[in-house]
Image (cartoon, rainbow, N blue to C red):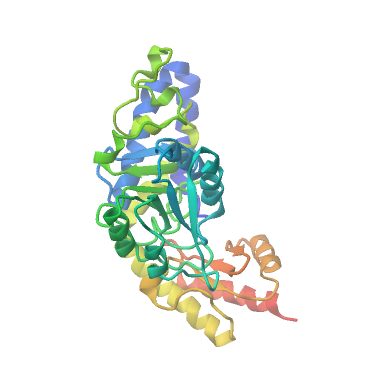
Amino acid sequence: MGAAPIAARDELVAFWDDWTRDGPAAWERWLPAIDDVADGIGAIIGAPAGSVGLAPNVSSLQETLASALDWSGERNGVVIEQLQFPSLQYVWDAWRCRGARPVRVPSDDGRTIPTQRIIDAIDNRTRIVLLSHAYFQSGYVVDVAPIAARAHECGALVFVDIYQTAGAIPLDVVALDIDVAVGGSHKWLCGGPGCGYLYVRPYLREELQPTATGWMAHAAPFAFEPPPMRYAPGMKRFGNGTPPMPSFLMARAGHRLIREAGAESIRAHNLALTELILAEADARGIRTPTPRESARRTGWIGLDVKDGERIVRELERRRIFVDYRPGCGIRVGPHFYNSAEEIGDFFEALDELRAP
């Protein structure tokens, strides 16, 4: 979880000031701010202005997207990796009752999946291919390009979860030639929880009419019209109910910092620190299930140590914030604000906590 920017507090105070001063009239500023936040995320991931929308989380965005697709025919396959984050798997598995046909691509080692195996799972019955840009179990970065090429050759949509990579590595959703991307703000974007986002390729979005919807997806939400639904143009058509404005506004401060630091600089700094982590781990004989090749991993290193979950709790008491995942161990993810000295402090504490 990314560190909280000082300016995020200012955003929350400004929200409270607007609310107390203007009451319902504050929506006249809040609603345009949604577009500002969305375009700020777009600038980080290489998306054109107006091609990103917001929602509280990725799970709700999955449901919205699934509801916009036709599952009535033979093209009902959903190719999904076994290593995809569970929340996404839950949503798409639930769509079996509406005609979706999940096709799970297995992993041999619980950390990676061969690219060709994913390609081989795609055929002319595939409706959508769901990819993780990086697996949360290992940080392994997926080679999206050949998979996207095969999917488009078969007439399928390409969906990529960029939660694990956006803000940590340079990213361009247009260059990746993908149709849909989702992510959230509370990791590398330092935006806190409650600000998920959806990118949809511009030519595609007007074709989609989600049935998981709400009044904020209407072309004239404040007209309070009865059905039938008239969808808003652009990304607003993927909205649903009343937006969580505090979360959206709070996230803007972190997004701004990421843009100011710059993707290339963030990546260079992260690689230097993660190489240091690998060297320190090797010196201690600690197994690292993360890829050694820098181009194949996102911004963290996994340390497979005994009693990792207990150690993480002890580190939190010392205000050293890492996390733990079963099958991976302790995930150490240095960001642009971290230093080599802090890596040294982490390993000093780890040595103490690992001592018999």
Q: Report the quarter where the C terminus lies.
A: bottom right
Report the residue at 48% width, 56% height from top.
103
Residue 323 drawn above or below residue 259:
below
- Regarding residue 105, the answer to whether it shows in the image is yes
Marks counted in the figure total 0
Quadrant assignment, res 313:
bottom right
Q: Nearer the viewer, residue 272 or 45?
A: 45
- Regarding residue 250, the answer to whether it shows in the image is no
Residue 103 placement, left or right of 151: right
Q: Nearer the viewer, residue 17 or 222?
A: 222
Report the residue at 25% width, 44% height from top.
48
Give how far across and how far down residue 187 sits, in percent.
48, 54
Q: Nearer the viewer, residue 226 or 308?
A: 226
Residue 88 drawn above or below residue 264:
above
Residue 106 drawn above or below residue 65:
below
Q: Nearer the viewer, residue 3 or 65?
A: 65
Report the residue at 46% width, 73% height from top.
340
Residue 80 drawn above or below residue 245:
below
Give how far across and how far down residue 159 sits, in percent.
38, 51
Give how far across and how far down residue 126 sits, in percent.
38, 51
Quadrant assignment, res 354:
bottom right
* Residue extending furthest toward the front: 74
Report the residue at 29% width, 28% height from top.
233
Give how far across and how far down residue 254 sits, in percent.
42, 48
* Residue extending furthest toward the right: 356
